[in-house]
Amino acid sequence: MESITKNRQSVEALRTMVARAYGPDEVCGAGEDWVDELSEGWFNVAYRIRLRSGTHVVLKIAPPPDVEVMTYERDAMATELEALRLVREHTKVPVPEVHFADRTHEVCDADYFFMTYVDADNLHVIRDTLSQAEISAYDEALGAITRELNTIPGTAFGPLSGPGESTWRAAFLRMVEELLGDGERRGVVLPGGYDAIREAVAAHADALDEVTEPRFVEWDLWPGNCMVRDGRIVSILDHERAFYGDPLMEFGFTGSESDAFGDATAFIRGYGQGPSTPTERTRRRLYNLHLALIQTIETTFRAHTNTDQYNWACTRLQETLTLLTTPAH
């Protein structure tokens, strides 16, 4: 996926990064085939690199400092590093191991880190080749993994490294307002307008008060961030959007209130979630609204060259606004 946030580096810069992380003896010689860009990501640039010893690793680089990102994406790499630490220390969920992280900007104009390379298939890439039974099995496994991630407790709601809020209502309203501020600043046109969105969120904010315990929320755990091999999920990737909040905000629940995001049945079964209450359904609709806002507004920040995602996300945004005017049962 192409995006102006991808901070590609010269071959010489990549060599310097490898030397700093693993030592000069691990830098491959000139003319060798040792680096290629991984294309699946949407935000950071990532390279698969072969060390001189033959080991493959992944280098991930944050966006360049002169590219404006959305408010919630600022310092995203620090969030990912903290998320990886928490997941490895508190769960058995498979994630890459961080080998080296550099936030000095001495070699590169942005943060970067090296991690283990996962030799497996991207679930989103191969999904169309799978049977429905295989898809359901993966979705169920994804539900179980998500539930385990949500066991990690926080001390406040919001960013993993703070500052946090004492209530989920305050944290979520801030998240929405930051998105709306981003959109207004860049002149993004939203269906219904900004005031209608603010009014819809305010009208249903009481439903957020039911959430009293901050929990680790991966949020971006969709098939494109799952690596699979031999019928199993062997790693999950891209943790830069994690925060402490309501587990119901996880991506796997999205389809429970909108068929456009797929069928959430197998995920919910794997998660072990019972039937949703009216208040839970209202919260999930608010979270779908938040997701649609991101998907709409980010197209301007990413400088998309066509309107396909914008049009699709605007439709989801309008659908969710309509749902919020319908009582949940």
Image: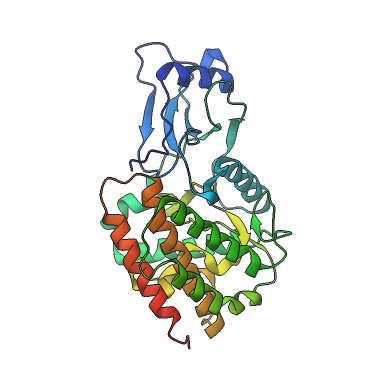
Way the structure is coloured:
rainbow
Q: How many marks?
A: 0
Query: Is residue 296 among the parts visible in the rendering?
Result: yes
Q: Is residue 152 left or right of residue 66?
A: right
**Horizontal and vertical percent position of residue 144:** 53, 64
Residue at 43% from the left image edge and 32% from the top image edge: 7
Q: Is residue 210 above or below residue 159?
A: below
Extreme top residue here? Answer: 30
The foreground one among 201 and 280 is 201
Q: Is residue 168 left or right of residue 114?
A: right
The foreground one among 36 and 289 is 289
The foreground one among 81 and 279 is 279
The foreground one among 219 and 324 is 324
Q: Is residue 230 above or below residue 316?
A: above
**Horizontal and vertical percent position of residue 300:** 37, 49
Residue at 31% from the left image edge and 51% from the top image edge: 126
**Horizontal and vertical percent position of residue 139:** 42, 64
**Horizontal and vertical percent position of residue 14:** 46, 21
Query: Is residue 269 among the parts visible in the rendering?
Result: no
Q: Is residue 190 above or below residue 117?
A: below
Q: Is residue 170 above or below residue 23?
A: below
Q: Quadrant of the N terminus?
A: top left
